[in-house]
Amino acid sequence: MKFKFWPKTKVMRFSVIAFTLSIIISLFSMGFLGLGLYFIASPILTLLFPNVPSDMNTWHGDWVWPAMISLPMIWSFSFLIAASVYLYLQKLDWTNLTLKTCYIVILLLWNLLIWLVLLLNVMPEMS
């Protein structure tokens, strides 16, 4: 039995590369990727958590720095999830525009989900 390391489909190859690069960038950017991901999710997060300050300069505690580095690492798994959903929906003959839209929506929703989980766990520390 032959094991193939590199995926056959174009979308899965892109997702593996994006997954790897986003993990590397999240570590070496020292939190800037986490900051960018927060600002993408911040309009919805401010609606759900009006008591949380939207300015990250006011955040304090031992959780802030590790969160800014580790959350993008967790977010990078959304590329693999989105690619598998893309391939599944492609088998169902969805249009190309719909497939790409679903891919992007999965990336955005995963970002929102990980920020929601983090903020729900650190809300007592922020007040």
Image: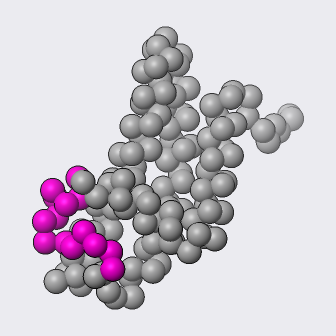
Q: Magenta residues? A: 44-57
- Residue at 50% x, 17% y: name it: 96
- Which of 60/16 is in front? 60
Tell me where residue 22 appears, x and y as whole percent.
60, 56
55 in magenta: yes
- Residue at 63% x, 71% y: name it: 28
Quadrant the N terminus occupies: top right
66 in magenta: no
Tell me where residue 62 appears, x and y as whole percent.
39, 88
- Residue at 38% x, 82% y: name it: 63
- Residue 121 visible, this orientation: no
Quadrant the C terminus occupies: bottom left
Q: In the figure, is residue 79 to the left or right of 94?
A: right
Quadrant in the picture for residue 35: bottom left
Tell me where residue 78 appears, x and y as whole percent.
49, 47
- Which of 36/90 is in front? 36
Q: Residue furthest right?
A: 2
Q: In the figure, is residue 105 to the left or right of 22?
A: left
Tell me where residue 12 appears, x and y as whole percent.
64, 35
- Residue 51 visible, this orientation: yes
Quadrant in the picture for residue 46: bottom left
